[in-house]
């Protein structure tokens, strides 16, 4: 169950271990204005490679060059962390995300235009920590950004905060913040899915089904392909003896990926529902 991050472009395949070693993140003594300008140009090239040409590996090369020139290029550090995080390489994502948070915390005080990036860096760090099975560490980071009025996407921070609470088995707290997330952004399908999970853990089947229905009916991109949401809704339907609805959800779950953990579980349940 991955956390939500605001990655500019989530590359579909970077199934390699760290191809580039992240640089030692020391101070910026000796960084000239020319080096900073070169670093920014490398960063801008990386953004183009990622967003326009979908070349995450080449983008990482340019980003590494950018932080070699200027270790305090927070935008480059943030994007490195987001690319690794979007590829499931959360251990590699943590260090550059922490560096981005450190630099942006200082610089955003003097430049309010950086407030959104500061929020994005904290949200991305929180997401990485959750996926590293360290939700307790993620909690203060996400609480801070979820309360930041300058962060333009508070529903994402609330969604990750809810996920941290779920991981800590604090289901009532998870439901509370996820209700705020979907109230702020009703079409936030991942938030509704997680809200459904929180309600299910609290044995509130009707509200869980309602949240899952909203998640899977949302028109947002990918909302009708949340495989674990189909699995959970099927389990709830089976609990209520709604066999036809459960069969439909299990079938869809299996179709979305028969080789995933959810897909295999749905296939097994479907055989049980259909009988000999």
Image (spheres, helix red, strand yellow):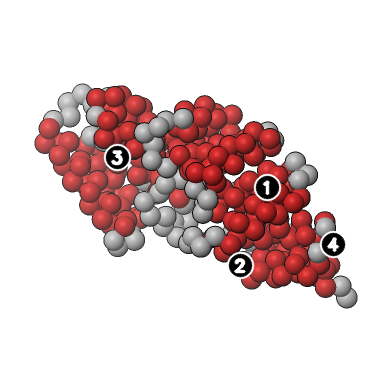
Residue in the foreground of this view, choosing between 246 and 80? 246
On the picture, is 132 further left or further right than 25?
right
Q: Indicate which label's residue lies in the foreground, 3 or 1.
A: 1
Query: Looking at the rendering, which quadrant does residue 170 occupy?
Result: top right
Residue lying at 54% horizontally and 44% vertically, measured from the top left: 183
- Residue 164 horizontal/vertical position (percent): 59, 36
Residue 221 located left or right of residue 214 = left
Q: Earlier in the sequence, mark 2 or mark 4?
A: 4
SS for dot 1: helix
Which numbered marker is on residue 256?
2
- Residue 197 is marked as 1
Spatial distance from mark 1 to mark 4, Cα to Cα?
19 Å
User: Would you call the spot at circle 4 few (<14 residues within 10 Å), some (14-19), or many (20 or more)?
Assistant: few
Picture quarter containing residue 243?
bottom right
Looking at the rendered structure, the secondary structure element under dot 4 is: loop
Residue 58 horizontal side relative to residue 261, left or right: left
Q: CA distance from mark 3 to mark 1?
A: 34 Å
Q: Which residue is mark 4?
A: 241
């Amino acid at each position: 169950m991955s956390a939500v991050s605001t990655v500019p472009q989530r590359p579909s395949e970077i199934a390699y271990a760290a191809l580039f070693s992240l640089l030692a993140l020391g101070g910026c003594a000796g960084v000239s204005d020319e080096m900073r300008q070169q670093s920014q140009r490398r960063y801008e090239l990386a953004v183009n490679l990622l967003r326009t040409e979908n070349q995450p590996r080449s983008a990482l090369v340019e980003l590494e060059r950018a932080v070699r020139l200027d270790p305090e290029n927070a935008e480059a550090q943030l994007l490195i962390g987001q690319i690794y995080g979007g590829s499931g390489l959360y251990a590699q994502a943590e260090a550059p995300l922490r560096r981005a948070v450190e630099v942006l915390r200082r610089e955003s005080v003097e430049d309010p235009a950086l407030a959104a990036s500061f929020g994005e860096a904290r949200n991305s760090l929180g997401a990485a920590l959750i996926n590293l099975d360290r939700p307790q560490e993620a909690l203060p980071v996400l609480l801070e950004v979820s309360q930041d009025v300058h962060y333009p996407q508070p529903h994402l921070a609330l969604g990750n905060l809810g996920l941290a609470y779920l991981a800590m088995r604090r289901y009532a707290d998870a439901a509370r913040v996820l209700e705020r997330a979907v109230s702020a952004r009703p079409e936030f399908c991942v938030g509704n899915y997680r809200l459904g999970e929180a309600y299910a853990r609290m044995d509130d089947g009707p509200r869980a089904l309602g949240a899952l229905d909203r998640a899977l009916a949302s028109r947002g991109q990918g909302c009708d392909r949340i495989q674990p949401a189909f699995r959970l809704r099927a389990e709830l339907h089976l609990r209520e003896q709604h066999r036809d609805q459960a069969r439909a959800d299990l079938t869809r779950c299996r179709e979305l990926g028969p080789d995933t953990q959810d897909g295999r579980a749905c296939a097994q349940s479907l055989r049980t529902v259909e009988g000999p």
